Image: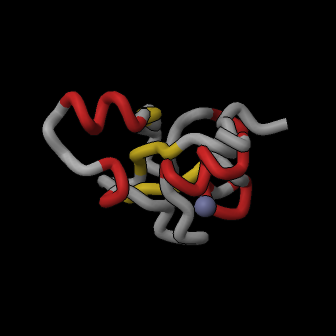
Amino acid sequence: MGKLREDSLYLGDNGRCFCGRDECSGITASCTGHDISGLLIIRITADEVKAAGMISDSFKCETCGRGFSDFAKTKGL
Ligand SMILES: [Zn+2]
């Protein structure tokens, strides 16, 4: 099992935005919680994005294209 949550977005790999799916985060990130450069991957939440004055929908997984609104749909909220 990976360390990342499928329905969360993360920043790593020099600012790349990705979700926690193995195929999006990469196996290194999924298994270690660090990116291929050895840097810690940061989990970002919709609330944090809003608190920073940014639009949560502007953050999406660069691989599969899912964002916070898609995660909310998945959970049925
Ligand atoms: Zn993804």
Q: Where in the image, quadrant-wise, is ligand 1 located? A: bottom right
Q: Is residue 3 left or right of residue 8?
A: right
Q: Quadrant of the C terminus?
A: top right
Q: Nearer the viewer, residue 7 or 62?
A: 7
Q: Nearer the viewer, residue 65 or 50?
A: 50
Residue at x 67%, y 37% (from the top left corner): 5
Q: Is residue 8 left or right of residue 60?
A: right
Looking at the image, can residue 38 be seen?
yes
Quarter of the rendering containing residue 49: top left
Quarter of the rendering containing residue 3: top right
Q: Is residue 65 left or right of residue 53?
A: right
Residue at x 47%, y 68% (from the top left corner): 62
Q: Position of residue 44 (x, y in %)?
A: 41, 35
Q: Position of residue 43 (x, y in %)?
A: 46, 33
Q: Is residue 54 left or right of residue 71?
A: left
Q: Nearer the viewer, residue 4 or 47?
A: 47
Q: Position of residue 48 (x, y in %)?
A: 31, 29
Residue at x 50%, y 45% (from the top left corner): 9
- Total marks drawn? 0
Q: Is residue 65 above or below residue 6?
A: below
Q: Residue furthest right?
A: 1
Q: Quadrant of the N terminus?
A: top right
Q: Residue furthest front?
A: 77
Snapshot colouring: secondary structure
Looking at the image, can residue 29 be seen?
no
Residue at x 25%, y 50% (from the top left corner): 55
